[in-house]
Image: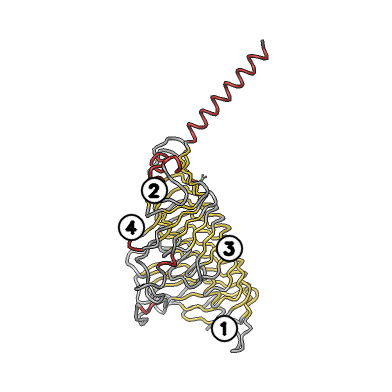
Amino acid sequence: MGLKINVGTVALLLLLALYAANAQSGVFDITKYGGKSNGDITQAVTKAWQGACQTAGKSKVVIPKGTYRMGAVQFNGPCKGRIEFQIQGTVQAPGDRSYFKSGSWVNFQRINGFTLSGGGTFDGKGSSVWGKRSCSGIKYCGDLPISLRFDFISNGLIQGITSLDSKQFHINLLGCKNVTFQHVNIIAPRTSPNTDGIHIGRSSGIRIIDTKIATGDDCVSIGDGSRDILVQRVTCGPGHGISVGSLGKYSNEEPVVGVKVVDCTLTNTQNGVRIKTWPNSYSGTASNIHFENLLMKNVDRPIYVNQAYCPWNQCKAQSPSKVKISDVTFKNIKGTANTREAVTLVCSKAVPCQKVLLSDIDIQYHGKDGRPTFQCTNIKPMLSGKQNPSPCTVK
Ligand SMILES: *[C@@H]1O[C@H](CO)[C@@H](O)[C@H](O)[C@H]1NC(C)=O
């Protein structure tokens, strides 16, 4: 009798536990909303999101394995509980640019407690627009949609996903707090215009860790209002490197404070680590920025501060930048340059760089046009440890 009750009780408890877990975990699979492989899932995924977002406790949106088409979508919060978006398959953007109205393809907005995971791929189908009409590679392609936009996300984790061939930026952050990216893959051809990997703006507590970025523009760019940013164990290449900026183009830009770029490898990139500000600019500041333990492999300009940044000839580089750069370290940076310009520090005549330290730099250059250079303009860097190339003469 005792045994019988025990088995029954255990079974009943198990059933109750399963039921409770199911009700609590709220799985919203797009196939339950009519989503089919090789079909358009715009409606299905929107409905699944709405269901999940209105669920208290934990909930999950699932895009199972398979290939799907998806138009521009907005996943808006606030939601009633923590929400996970699991993409296991591949979703493809429409090829035609006229389809997009909001400047983004996939937009997550105003969510507190958010995970994006699942091992799947966002395919932006960028090759259908790169190099077309106004977007020929010399002009700015700002009107094309960004693949993944995160606006006002707090306490988020984005892991194990791939962004392929975005039309413009792959990933953009605005107003985010405490968001970690890890094991993210970003892929686009070297020649794809304006395909920045991850752009951070007006956000704090952002970590980009163990991430691979191969793209046509900056791998990571850190814009105004960025605070407490960590970029660690990121590989970049091809691409334009890891950048702070560009800064000073707009009025009311917020300071960039507290950036660490550590343990990264840059391969065949246009720049290694860079700080860029526009000439003839609005005022601003960039401080407490640290580049440490970096490996450069065949990088055009491995260490580069450029306060006369002016792509696409949009400005007359006559009056100097008013963005103040201070408290910057370049430490233990090794490898090879692809041009003579191994270390180039071009600061502003109006606000010279202050407290910039270079320590243990060893950048080789094997080209036939001479030895590698270390150029300083409007800066007196502090130096320690090994210096190759030999530093600019500090007057
Ligand atoms: C930051 O976000 C992560 C992921 O959602 C969360 O686990 C962690 O508790 C948050 N940290 C803080 C200090 O809120």
Residue 71 position, x and y percent, is: 38, 54
Mark with earlier residue (2, 4): 2
Which-is-in-front pick, marks 1 and 2? 2
Label located before the other in sequence (1 or 3): 3
Mark-to-mark CA distance, 3 and 2: 33 Å
Circle 1 crowding by C-alpha within 10 Å: few under 14, some 14–19, many from 20: many
From the image, state whether disc 3 or disc 4 is nearer to you. 4
Vertical position of residue 374 compared to residue 38: above or below: below
Q: What residue type is labelled 4?
A: Ser
Tell me the CA gap for discs 1 and 2.
47 Å
Task: Assess whether mark 1 and mark 4 are in contact (beta carbons under 8 angstroms).
Answer: no
Q: Of the two numbered discs 4 and 1 on the same chain, state the one appearing first in sequence.
A: 4
> How busy is the neighbourhood of tag 4: few (under 14 within 10 Å), some, or many (20 plus)?
some
Q: Distance between the residues labelled 2 and 4?
A: 13 Å
The residue singled out by tag 1 in the image is: 340
Q: What residue type is labelled 2?
A: Phe
Marks 1/3: CA–CA distance = 24 Å
Q: Based on the displayed image, in which of its 4 quarters is residue 307 positioned?
A: bottom left
Q: What residue type is labelled 1?
A: Arg
Q: Residue under circle 4?
A: 102
Query: Which residue does the numbered mark 3 point to in the structure image?
Result: 262
Q: Which amino acid does label 3 sit on?
A: Val
**Disc number for residue 75:** 2
